[in-house]
Image (cartoon, grey):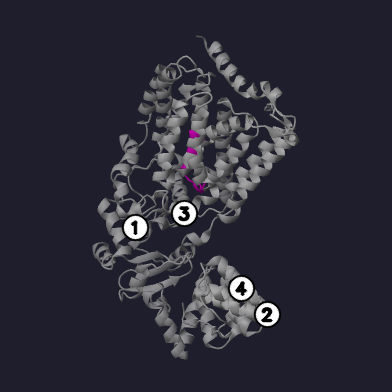
Amino acid sequence: MSRRRRAKGGDAHATAESTEPTRRRTSAAPATSRAAPVPPSHPALLLAGAVAAACVVVTVSFKLWETDFWQHLLVGKAIWALHRVPVTQLWSWPTYGAPDVNPSWGFSALIWPVWQAGGITALFAWRWATTLGAFVLLWLAARRMGSRGFTALVVIAVCALMWRDRSQVRPETLVAVLFALQIWILETRRGGGPDRSLWLIPLAWVWVNVHLSYHLGLAMIAIHVLNDLIAPRITAGRALRFTPAPGRLALVGLLAFAISFVNPFGWHALWQPFEYQFFWRHEPIYAAIAELQPLFPLAWQSKIWTGLPLWLAAWPVLAILRTRRPGLDVVEWLTCAFYTSLAVGSVRFVGFYALAAAPFLARDLGEWAGRTRLPDALASPWARAGLASLLCVALALPQWTHGEPLGVGFAERRVPKAACDFMLAHDVGGHGFNPFYFGGYMLWRFWPEKDRLPFMDIHQSGSGDERDRYVRTFTQPEGWNQLDTRYRFDYALLDAAQDPPARDPLRDLLDADPRFALVFRDDAAALYVRREGRNAEIASALGYHLVPGGDARLPAFGRAVQADSTLRSAAKRELERQVAESVFNADAHSLLANLAFLDHDPTAAKAHLEASLAANPGIYGAHERLALIAMQAGDAAQAVRHLEAELRVSNGTPLLARRLAEAYQRLGNVEKAREWYGRAGLRSPSPSSAAPDTSGG
């Protein structure tokens, strides 16, 4: 059969699918009708498409909070500076010079010129372009599969919500385009259109050089080869779609696999995803990484507003319903089974699930919508365009309002920016320790200085033994001492973020370790240096004596400054230094507010609490203490506003409920007061006076 005849067969099938509702419209009831097909150039479809595209762009327009991209930028910078792809470790000091495998080197080499062209704005342009490019290709693939009308646009906008978390500036943004392009090529071929399967060979080569997920592309080729072998037997006598011969695609798959070995790291790059699956994923360090966790039972809660749980259940149902009409779609069933299992097994694959599901959901829901009798008010394409546009926005709004705040930029409180400034200003260096997710930013700031390279980078570089020792520093009291005995650290740059609040036992341990001194602290990081060796002078001159870096000593700190006004003055000077050294100073202002309470200075306390909220609107306890000040000033209405704001940033406590009840009681709102007394577990009003909490916590 010639290519022309095959294409005509595929197009005839698509036409039959799209026009069937029109042929049966005569049997419809007078009050309803079936929607007539809308040509792709219709202005109403173009308008709805523009709204869907705008929704996709807004969905991925939140501040970058993932820190990995700093290392990707640095590696790209190094590649361009060295004029080669490094195949040895240049990124962490314990493994320096050892063989290295970096499957994402191609992405790094591409993203560095983007950054040079326009900084953070250019990175967002990359983010928008790759996301739109991927979903436009998936929409085109859905049309090749028979999808028509406006439903596909709504599905695309919804699937972008599931993709949202993977839209950080990372290799998957480029892989999304490659993945969508592959689906479009394969579905065009399957539908009887031009066979562009040879394109899959260079696509596979690009993929293996930008991300370790290359095997997902090979898996899609394998799924279509299986379809070519199985589908004719299943649909014998009732072929619903042209099924090409499998030989050519199987050969393309073999060549795609073969060309994947053409990368700077050879077979090691191809082995890496399987090495993780069979060996690494059982290590404690990987078990603790959120994106590597199974979707159930905990991680799915963060995906509620994306609609993911609904689509996980709906896709198999839609596939079953579709089987009753045109027959079994082998590709859909295999794709659904494969990517659903991946997404359920690891949160990291939810984005790929969204990409794989998009064209099938668009087609299946579009066919269902095409068989649905619509009110006459929706007979016009413009009315349906308005409805589709409204759905795109309405379905995205919960995620826009409950997820990461929208905006362009980077969440700087996630990285030790001011701490690195301090290290450069005071020449802090040597063999340091850091959480691996700080490693990328440290490289960005310090590479190629060997005496400031991170202990561990974003790829958790090192042996399995080193990774286990790293984890034990955070989980076992003796873990830090064992690691320090082995490496004798000159400094430790630790995470100090309190949003959400979490105890870091390593900061508490170093607070109690006489060998180390805290020399810098802000909302993002705490820097400790050894009192002997290279940083001894800094430890002596700038070490904190009263204010701790961790949480365990805060109650004792509070009792000490409450009992001794001299210590209180010294603590105030240390906290004022923290305020001066970093704009991320919400914690320092919060503690200064407590000292002001002890000095019976509510005006200063209020100023510090307001400054704390300005530095970090999500800090815990600030609104509650402002409410206490308002209550003491007789402004119960202001107290209610602050207490309700506190509820939005914390989970609430019986004490907070009691204070809300007291505030409403002073306002004379008996019903609200009774409600909040009930939530506090109290049956009757308690005394309305409440002393400020000055424990230092």
In this view, the mark in front (2 or 3): 2
Disc 4 is placed on an element classified as helix
The CA span between labels 3 and 1 is 16 Å
Q: Which residue is mark 1?
A: 455
Numbered mark located on residue 67 in the image: 3
Instruction: Characterize the local packing of mark 1: few (<14), some (14-19) or many (20 or more) Cα atoms within 10 angstroms.
Output: many
Which one is nearer the viewer's eye here, 287 or 261? 287
Identity of the amino acid at label 3? Thr
Identity of the amino acid at label 4? His
The CA span between labels 1 and 2 is 59 Å
Disc 2 is placed on an element classified as loop
Q: Residue furthest top?
A: 1
Residue 393 belongs to magenta span: no
The CA span between labels 2 and 4 is 18 Å
Q: Residue at x 51, y 27 (%)?
A: 324
Q: Are marks 4 and 1 in contact (CB under 8 Å)?
A: no
Name the dominant secondary structure of the magenta segment. Answer: helix
Q: Residue at x 56, y 50 (%)?
A: 119
Q: Are marks 4 and 3 in contact (CB under 8 Å)?
A: no
Q: Is residue 360 above or below residue 292?
A: above
Instruction: Characterize the local packing of mark 3: few (<14), some (14-19) or many (20 or more) Cα atoms within 10 angstroms.
Output: many
Closer to the chain start, of discs 2 and 3, is 3
Identity of the amino acid at label 1? Phe
In this view, the mark in front (4 or 3): 4
Closer to the chain start, of discs 4 and 3, is 3
The CA span between labels 2 and 3 is 49 Å
Question: Residue 575: percent from the left, percent from the top?
Answer: 49, 78
Closer to the chain start, of discs 2 and 4, is 4
Which one is nearer the viewer's eye here, 2 or 441? 2
